[in-house]
């Protein structure tokens, strides 16, 4: 029984549901780092289950995904065949995931140049880019997929690394550079375009460590403020460890990463609101009180991750929350790994499910970019660009300079925004999420933005933001469920279910595609 269709509820009077278009009153976006869909779900729902690794056995009738199988698994056109990475191989090298190499790896849709263009250097074999994990390593994510909803057709909005992904999440826009502190590098801003394609840091941030850019235009924070909706970005390491003689914040808290080296918790180019003057907290000031978390004060909606739990404990959870793990727990290859990421995700989601707010909450787990990891699906190109940084079409010869472009752009279109980019994992965890469900509709990072806009009637960003064309996430929900007691608690070390209500929901409910 599916209950009331989601799209009908979305069109219902907002007054009937307490100011939101759906029963969702709290949205929590957990934004992780650098994973392609195939890297985590290539063989879903089939795990190898070798001795010594947590076992995963899918519920009967579990839907399949568009993964790596058949001829693609054994006669892949890439120079290295796809292969399973074991749990003991969780710590990997960071791959090349810049805007241009990601396009070159796709080779005009042939998808056959990943080792040559996005394969890692720095002492790692280029073929590692073809590796994937299964449910014996990313066990928690596979168990969440069993009990809630996932997508196998969710894409990065544009090609490129972390900063474009973060900006698209909150604004659907990477164009509009209007401030910078150093000459702009071609790998950070596409030449002659004013569009961010690399990882410059936020201009309005004391804790910057490299070149910075500021952006014009609006983001979702501006829209939420205009409607009086509480919100916040909560990031590990945001609280300053000290201040210098001028009073500027210093963010030096660090932990040992999966590579055995110290890693600073706070990564400036993972904080997108610091690129906009209107939503920045340059000096990393704390909220003036617990009651003001989510409201506009000196913190300006930018907080340390600890502030999120302080607000939650006080019953003051903002309506829209973005959570960013400290770097060593964010899953970014090179300094973090899937097991460290799992600890963060499970600890966070277990705690969220125990809050009174859980009964009307939607948790989105998303990733900012693919890290260049192999994914076999050619994304739909909905935004064309022929800047000098684009190289999706034309020859793709290893060692040669970029050639080709990303199609003929529409008149007046902002360049340097070739997209969609690579396919990414995406999961919805909520009492209202469909159970053991795989969504195949085309969505992207700005689909999250669009859901928030529509749920609180915020309007659109405008100025060619991708939110205007984003696919809907509502098909991943069944608002007729209304089961506030439905929880799935997992073990953060193994990712396996612990004694909870709802842990066998996937096996008792008919799975749906």
Image: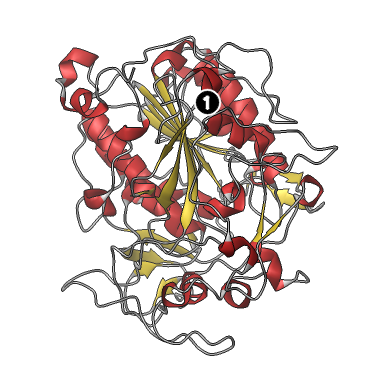
The quadrant of the picture occupied by the N terminus is top left
**Residue 237 in view, yes or no:** yes
Q: Secondary structure at mark 1?
A: helix
Q: Where 234 falls versus 17 (above or below)?
A: below
Q: Tag 1: Cα neighbours inside 10 Å, few (<14), some, or many (≥20)?
A: many
Residue at coordinates 33% horizontally, 70% vertically from top-left?
194
Residue at coordinates 55% horizontally, 56% vertically from top-left?
208
| Label 1 sits on residue | 147
Quadrant in the picture for residue 338: top right
Residue nearest the observer in this picture, 15 or 277: 15
Image coords of residue 294 (percent x, y):
40, 27
Residue nearest the observer in this picture, 380 or 409: 380
Residue nearest the observer in this picture, 480 or 15: 480
Locate residue 259 relative to residue 348 in the image: left or right. Answer: right
Residue at coordinates 36% horizontally, 41% vertically from top-left?
448
Q: Where 349 falls versus 267 (above or below)?
A: above
The quadrant of the picture occupied by the C terminus is top left
Image coords of residue 496 (percent x, y):
69, 27
Quadrant in the picture for residue 92: bottom right
Q: Where 420 falls versus 504 (above or below)?
A: below
**Residue 202 in view, yes or no:** no
């Amino acid at each position: 029984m599916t209950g009331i269709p989601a799209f009908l509820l979305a069109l219902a009077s907002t007054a009937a549901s307490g100011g939101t278009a759906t029963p969702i009153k709290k949205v929590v976006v957990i934004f992780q780092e650098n994973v392609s869909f195939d890297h985590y779900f290539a063989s879903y729902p089939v795990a190898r289950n070798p001795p010594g690794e947590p076992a995963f056995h899918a519920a009967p009738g579990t839907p399949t995904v568009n993964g790596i199988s058949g001829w693609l698994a054994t006669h892949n056109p890439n120079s290295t065949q796809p292969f399973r990475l074991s749990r003991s191989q969780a710590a990997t090298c960071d791959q090349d995931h810049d805007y241009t190499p990601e396009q070159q790896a796709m080779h005009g849709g042939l998808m056959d140049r990943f080792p040559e263009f996005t394969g890692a250097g720095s002492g790692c074999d280029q073929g590692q880019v073809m590796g994937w994990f299964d449910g014996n390593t990313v066990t928690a994510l596979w168990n969440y997929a069993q009990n809630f909803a996932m997508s196998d057709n969710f894409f990065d909005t544009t090609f490129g690394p972390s900063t474009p992904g973060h900006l698209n999440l909150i604004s659907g826009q990477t164009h509009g550079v209007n401030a910078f502190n150093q000459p702009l590098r071609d790998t950070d801003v596409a030449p002659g375009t004013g569009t961010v394609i690399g990882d410059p840091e936020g201009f309005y941030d004391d804790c910057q460590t490299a070149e910075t850019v500021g952006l014009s235009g609006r983001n979702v924070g501006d829209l939420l403020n205009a409607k009086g909706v509480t919100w916040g970005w909560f990031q590990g390491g945001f609280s300053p460890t000290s201040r210098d003689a001028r009073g500027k914040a210093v963010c030096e808290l660090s932990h040992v990463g999966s590579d055995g080296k110290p890693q600073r918790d706070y990564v400036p180019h993972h904080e997108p609101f610091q690129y906009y003057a209107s939503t920045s907290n340059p000096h990393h000031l704390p909220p003036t009180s617990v009651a003001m978390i989510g409201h506009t004060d000196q913190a300006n909606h930018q907080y340390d991750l600890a502030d999120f739990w302080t607000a939650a404990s006080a019953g003051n959870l903002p309506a829209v929350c973005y959570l960013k793990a400290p770097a060593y727990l964010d899953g970014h290859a090179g300094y973090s790994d899937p097991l460290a990421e799992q600890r963060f995700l499970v600890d966070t989601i277990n705690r969220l499910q125990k809050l009174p707010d859980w009964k009307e909450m939607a948790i989105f787990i998303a990733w900012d970019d693919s890290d260049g990891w192999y994914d076999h699906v050619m994304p739909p190109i909905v935004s064309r660009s022929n800047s000098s940084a684009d190289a999706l079409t034309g020859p793709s010869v290893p060692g040669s300079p970029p050639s080709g472009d990303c199609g003929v752009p529409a008149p007046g279109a902002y360049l340097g925004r070739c997209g969609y980019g690579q396919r990414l994992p995406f999961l919805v965890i909520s009492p209202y999420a469909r159970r053991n469900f795989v969504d195949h509709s085309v969505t992207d990072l700005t689909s999250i933005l669009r859901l928030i806009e529509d749920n609180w009637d915020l309007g659109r960003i405008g100025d060619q933001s991708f939110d205007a064309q984003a696919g809907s996430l509502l098909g991943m929900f069944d608002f007729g469920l209304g089961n506030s007691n439905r929880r799935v608690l997992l073990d953060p070390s193994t990712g396996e279910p612990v004694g909870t209500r709802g842990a066998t929901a996937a096996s008792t409910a008919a799975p749906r595609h």
